[in-house]
Image (cartoon, helix red, strand yellow):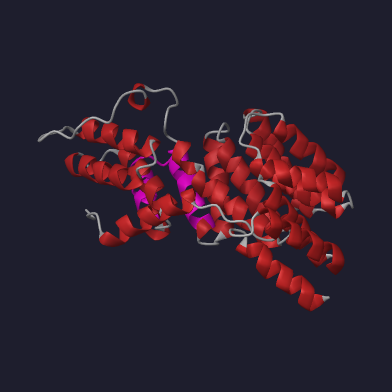
Amino acid sequence: MKVLTKKVLTNLLAVIILLAANSWGCAHKDRNWREESIFRQTGSAKELHLRKGSASSKIGTPKELTYMTCEEHERLGDVNFSRGDLVSAFVQYEKSLRLNPDNSNIRYKKGLLLVIGGMNEDAIREFQEVLKNEPKHALSHEGLGLAYFQMEKYDVAEACFRVAVEINPKLWKSQNSLGVIYDYEKRYKTAVREYKAAIKLKPDEGLLYNNLGTSYFLAGNYKEAIKAFNKGLSTKGPHNKIYNNLGLVLSKIGKHQEALDAFRKGGDQAQAYNNLGCIYLKQKKYKEAIRCFEKAIELKPTFYIKANENLKKARLAR
């Protein structure tokens, strides 16, 4: 059996850093929509097997004993996983599997950690091991979909998500992932159908409305996009992504003041002016762009390096 390697630890640590990072650039770039979608699939994966409100999340982290059973290592791994300590969780799942290599549940969790760490080929091997013994293990099919998705093998990922939903129609994350794939392929009507199906299963999940609104936006249906984003804002947070995307749509239809307000609610004043400046820059409204970037710098003179870079671009373009 494969032992824990330095490469695995490095990748898992990199993911923790990524989850903590928060950068702002020009909000109008299409790549932001794409990267946000990818991040949602992998970043939300950690909730797939964790039970909210479980006893393990309400107590302190237990100390590792000299001898622990397979179940105890798994439980300690779950506690670490729920707290975002992915490296420690991986170590515990490895120890658990050494004691019981045939435990499909633990192997699935290990595979999920590898997906989050970007170790997609290793993750695929773990999920395939599970499916050898349990061909209808729906979550492992979903895990395969996530791994292939990150490898940009969208046809294979789509097939995996389809199988997962056929086995368990309640897997709303698989339906959401299918929607993202169809958005990549510019099959927006099909993507909308998948997001709506996911929303029926999880009507309180704001990110589903965010994805639905994004799909409408990419299809040029701005009215429906605004409706979807507003519905998302009526769910429990966080709402910063939705406000930012709502600002993009509002600016697209010329409602720049409303867009500025939305950007402000999604971040702060400086970020809002920088985002709006990026939109003006794309629209070749250089005077307005310069004014926005100068305002962003005025609000955060020592911090907002990005606005300085954008201001130079606007002045050169003018």
Numbered disc total? 0
- Residue 237 on image: x %, y %: 62, 33
- Residue at point 17%, 32% (across, down): 69
| Magenta run includes residue 94 | no
- Residue at point 38%, 45% (across, down): 131
- Residue 105 on image: x %, y %: 34, 37
Q: Magenta segment, which residues?
A: 124-149
- Residue at point 22%, 31% (across, down): 72
Above or below: residue 130 compared with residue 293: above
- Residue 41 on image: x %, y %: 55, 47
* Residue closest to the eye, 109 or 27: 27
Image quadrant in which the C terminus is located: bottom right
| Magenta run includes residue 138 | yes
* Residue closest to the eye, 116 or 102: 116
- Residue at point 76%, 51% (across, down): 188
Q: Inspect this view and state whether residue 27 appears.
A: no
Instruction: State left or right for residue 307 relative to residue 88.
Output: right
Q: Inspect this view and state whether residue 103 appears.
A: yes
Above or below: residue 184 compared with residue 56: below
